Amino acid sequence: MNPFFLLLLLVVIAVLGWRGVRRERERVAKALKEAEASLQKQKTGGRESLTLEQDPKTGVYRRPGDRS
């Protein structure tokens, strides 16, 4: 086989291998982010944590800016 074609074949294999590795790395990173988000959601009980302020007149705790 001509050395040029052998080199070309090796380059094609390397490029396809690199694309596969990159795709797998992106898949693993996405799965890791989803797992971290799931753990964070479990820590907060499925809800976002929020800060409450006590209304000085009534003593009732409400979200900041909520004056209903």
Image (cartoon, grey):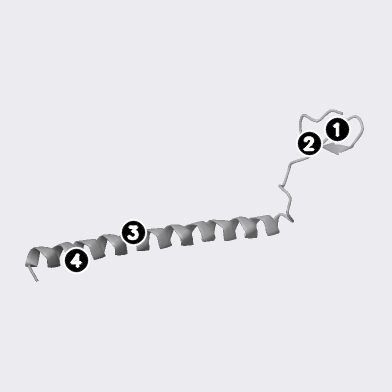
x then y, percent, for residue 46: 73, 54
Q: Name the residue type under label 1.
A: Asp
Residue depicted at x 64% and y 56%? 40
Disc 4 packing (10 Å; few <14; some 14–19; many ≥20): few
Q: Which residue is mark 4?
A: 10
Foreground tag (2 vs 1): 2
Cα gap from disc 4 to disc 2, whole angstroms: 63 Å
Of pointers 1 and 4, the one earlier in the residue sequence = 4
- Judged left or right of residue 1, residue 42 is right
The residue sitting at the left extreme is 2
Of pointers 1 and 3, the one earlier in the residue sequence = 3
Residue 55 got which mark?
Answer: 1
Residue 63 got which mark?
Answer: 2
> Is mark 2 in CB contact (under 8 Å) with mark 3?
no
Q: Name the residue type under label 2.
A: Arg
Cα gap from disc 1 to disc 4, whole angstroms: 72 Å
Of pointers 2 and 1, the one earlier in the residue sequence = 1
Quarter of the figure with residue 26 = bottom left
Residue 19 got which mark?
Answer: 3
Residue depicted at x 53% and y 60%? 31
Residue depicted at x 87% and y 28%? 68
- Judged left or right of residue 32, residue 3 is left
The residue sitting at the front extreme is 1
- Judged left or right of residue 6, residue 33 is right
Q: Nearer the viewer, residue 39 or 31?
A: 31
